[in-house]
Amino acid sequence: MRLLVIEDNRQLVANLFEYFEARGHVLDAAPDGATGLHLATSQAYDALVVDWMLPRMDGAEVLRRLRQQHHCETPAIMLTARDELPDKIAGFRAGADDYLTKPFDLPELEIRLEALLLRAHGRAQRKVLQVEDLVLDLSTLEARRGGRLLHLYPACRKLLETLMRASPAAVSRGELEYSLWGDEPPEGDLLRSHVYELRRVVDGPFERKLIQTLPRVGYRLAAVAGERLDG
């Protein structure tokens, strides 16, 4: 099991690492909500362990953005000292799959995580996005067009997923940058470079172009006739 722990209590994080790594699990940690959101959307995890009270972005907002903006369905359990019923309701509504109040026993957290994974695997998570003859398998991360395997590096694959989920609607440059880098985009116009590479792989070998540039708006992925527009 690969876990992302989004928690600012260093001692608790150390305890979690010691316990779970001794049982063969792999853990990453984020000390604040913004970092946690970035890791959760840029890397693959089996489950998330999310504290509520976090610097930069609280755990409820992290889950809300994961579910609503990034369509991330990774199972998540919220750890918090907030044990009132309204808090629990708010946590579940934000996107938590389970809710465990502090203090807690580590074996209980482990069994709850195992239960989350069993339920997730039982939902037949193999999912496929398709626009025209372009197919992205979210379970294998394979992209194909006309049956031909497309070789995409991770940033391009993330852009493709974002565009395919929205298709045929437009996606703003800001939304695409956020999907790649969260609240901390790099200097320069790296998005343009990534779109250029994505377009080279997805559209270059094919007569029918799919990736469109919308001036002063962003991009969209939909079938169009004619020449490819410049990025």
Image: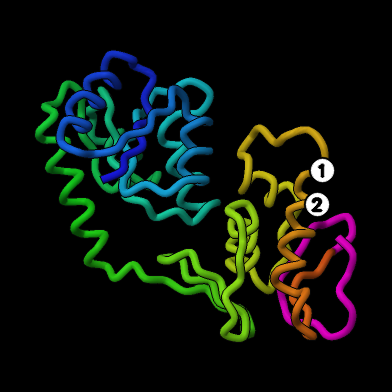
Label 1 SS: loop
The x and y percentages for residue 218 are: 79, 57
The x and y percentages for residue 63 are: 43, 42
Image point (15%, 38%), residue name: 110
Quarter holding the N terminus is top left
Picture quadrant of residue 11: top left
Quarter holding the C terminus is bottom right
Picture quadrant of residue 139: bottom left
Residue, disc 2? 192
Image point (64%, 34%), residue name: 183
Compared across the picture, whether 98 is left or right of 28 comes to left
Amino acid at pointer 2: Arg
List the single residue furthest toward the top: 11
Crowding around mark 2 (Cα neighbors within 10 Å: few <14, some 14 to 19, many 20+) is few
The x and y percentages for residue 168 are: 68, 74
Compared across the picture, whether 213 is left or right of 39 comes to right
Q: How many marks?
A: 2
Crowding around mark 1 (Cα neighbors within 10 Å: few <14, some 14 to 19, many 20+) is few
Considering depth in this image, is 92 or 126 the residue closer to the camera? Answer: 126
Could you say which disc has been placed on residue 189 in the image?
A: 1
Amino acid at pointer 1: Asp
Q: Is residue 219 magenta?
A: yes
Image point (18%, 57%), residue name: 118
Q: Which residues are magenta?
A: 214-231
